[in-house]
């Protein structure tokens, strides 16, 4: 860029736009002028970011003013230990896809192999899964010797609430928010030269960010191509006035798709995903899964749903949004020529999309699915070489294949495959050389310690009430 004072224009009025603006403002400070051109789109597509975040979102949320006290006191957010899958067409139709720190090694051998040798399941050893199943919650202590220290947690939230909070905060932080419609995107030499607003005002910038969801107004003006995968339909409703439920989202498979229920403070958010041909009872909107071939074209980078469409089966949408923002911050251009930054951005973007969709595609590596269009399309989607290798190695001998910088870690994959009832045919033969009685004693000790700690933890809603009282006292004391 030719001037030390950068102008960054973000087009979009939803969650991705305000989260991106807040992250850029926090990182760049006065080194940049940030402008949001708020489009007139409705907030319905924001529901597709899902209602849960993985533990990796903590730092991003804190950096944009969504720290834990703010989330719990100023929004209806709650804690999340993961997602409970039920009635899924797999060998094990119900499991808790939870968050957890690395599983222990026993005499240098990965934990998974001892379960395979004994025909045991993983969930009894996961304190986060056991706590979620009982409906209890407590913050993990710092003492690594405590069984609860192995648990991790994310948040359950309303995307609309977070977007509203960020919008207000951004205005206070000095980010310019223009509530005007976009009349025209002026393009010259494969770059955006200016955005022309309804008033006739022209906005020039060093960098344009497209957060216009599936409108993709800026990216489309530059000829960006969206590679469509599946056509789906979503409906979103709220059940008000209910007591805070357990610290997990429940997701149940249906004949024509799936439905998730996310407990929040005072209400439950309900999201259903089906094929457009399925019967419908509530207001719906349609969307496409897939992604742009290139998310950075010219002087414009697309972030969030403007760059991709992903079913919110897992925290993948929030993880990808975070990666988009962090990747863009890493590659802020230093000259007017963005080709080097765009090339690296698109390389990482492609890897992140591939890794995130592989994790979700693994959920459909099943047989005997319902004979409906949603499930036929899901299982027909190409499985990909990386996922094929992961599944083959795990089924053969319990090896968890890892690729660089995957958004879902080894524990996520272990919990997913074990939860779905995928059993390795063999285990590491080093297991046979380890004293069986000693291993039995260690496994029983872990399971017993987990059960004892969970039995003493308070219900999620009780913990929330007490914590909020404490935070209010600290605030006003």
Image (cartoon, rainbow, N blue to C red):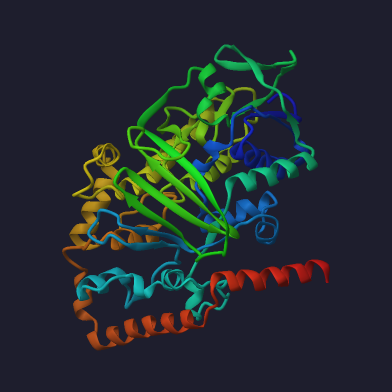
Number of labels in the image equals 0
| Quarter of the image that includes the N terminus | top right
Q: Nearer the viewer, residue 457 or 418?
A: 457
| Residue 59 location (% of width, % of height) | 61, 55
Q: Residue at x 18, y 59 (%)?
A: 396
The x, y position of residue 457, in whole percent, is 53, 79
Q: Residue placed farthest to the front in the image?
A: 281
> Along the line of sight, which residue is nearer the eye, 208 or 131?
131
Q: Answer left or right for 127 relative to 423.
A: right
Q: Is 125 placed left or right of 147 in the picture? A: left
Whether residue 78 is visible, yes or no, is yes
Q: Is residue 26 above or below residue 231?
A: below
- At 64% from the left and 47% from the top, the residue drawn is 161
Asked whether 214 or 259 is in front, the reply is: 259
Specify whether 231 is left or right of 214: left
Is residue 46 shown above or below 315?
A: above
Residue extending farthest to the top is: 188
Q: Foreground: 155 or 33? A: 155
Residue at the spot 73% in from the left edge and 68% down from the top edge: 471
List x then y, in percent, for residue 364: 28, 47
Can residue 296 be seen in the rendering of this structure?
no
Q: Residue at x 50, y 76 (%)?
A: 148
Residue 390, given in percent of the width and then of the height, sits at 27, 51
Q: Residue furthest right?
A: 477
Q: Is residue 153 above or below residue 470?
A: above
Q: Is residue 229 above or below residue 72?
A: above
Locate the C terminus and report the quarter of the image it occupies. bottom right
């Amino acid at each position: 860029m030719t001037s030390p004072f950068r102008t960054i224009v973000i087009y979009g009025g939803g969650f991705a736009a305000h989260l991106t603006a807040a992250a850029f403002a926090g990182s760049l400070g006065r080194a940049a002028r940030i402008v949001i051109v708020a489009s007139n789109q409705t907030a319905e597509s924001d529901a597709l970011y899902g209602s849960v975040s993985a533990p990796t979102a903590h730092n991003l949320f804190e950096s944009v003013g969504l720290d834990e006290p703010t989330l719990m006191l100023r929004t209806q957010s709650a804690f999340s230990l993961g997602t409970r899958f039920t009635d899924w067409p797999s060998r094990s139709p119900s499991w808790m896809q939870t968050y957890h720190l690395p599983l222990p090694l026993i005499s240098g051998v990965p934990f998974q192999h001892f379960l395979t040798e004994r025909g045991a399941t993983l969930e009894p050893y996961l304190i986060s899964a056991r706590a979620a199943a009982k409906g209890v919650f407590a913050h993990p202590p710092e003492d690594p010797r405590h069984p609860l220290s192995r648990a991790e947690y994310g948040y359950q939230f309303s995307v609309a609430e977070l977007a509203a909070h960020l919008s207000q905060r951004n205005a206070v932080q000095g980010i310019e928010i223009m509530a005007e419609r976009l009349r025209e995107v002026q393009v010259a030499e494969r770059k955006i030269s200016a955005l022309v607003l309804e008033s006739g005002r022209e906005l020039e910038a060093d960098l344009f960010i497209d957060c216009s969801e599936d409108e993709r107004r800026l990216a489309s003006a530059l000829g960006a191509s969206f590679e469509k995968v599946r056509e789906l339909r979503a409906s979103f409703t709220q059940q008000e006035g209910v007591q805070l439920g357990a610290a997990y989202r429940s997701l149940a498979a249906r004949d024509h798709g799936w439905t998730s229920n996310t407990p929040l403070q005072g209400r439950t958010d309900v999201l259903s995903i089906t094929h457009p041909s399925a019967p419908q009872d509530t207001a719906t909107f349609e969307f496409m899964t897939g992604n742009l071939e290139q998310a950075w074209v010219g002087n414009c980078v697309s972030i969030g749903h403007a760059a991709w469409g992903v079913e919110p089966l897992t925290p993948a949408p929030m993880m990808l949004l975070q990666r988009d923002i962090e990747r863009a911050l890493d590659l802020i251009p230093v000259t007017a020529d963005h080709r080097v930054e765009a090339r690296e951005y698109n390389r990482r973007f492609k890897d992140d999309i591939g890794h995130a969709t592989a994790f979700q595609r693994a959920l459909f590596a099943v047989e005997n699915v319902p004979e409906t269009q949603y499930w036929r399309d899901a299982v027909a989607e190409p499985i990909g070489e990386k996922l094929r290798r992961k599944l083959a190695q795990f089924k053969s001998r319990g090896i968890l294949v890892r690729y660089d910088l995957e958004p879902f870690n080894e524990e996520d994959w272990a919990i997913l495959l074990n939860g779905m009832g995928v059993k390795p045919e063999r285990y590491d033969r080093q297991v046979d050389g380890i004293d069986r009685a000693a291993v039995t004693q260690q496994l029983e000790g872990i399971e017993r310690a987990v059960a004892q700690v969970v039995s003493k933890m308070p219900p999620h809603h009780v913990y929330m009430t007490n914590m909020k009282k404490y935070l209010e006292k600290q605030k006003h004391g």
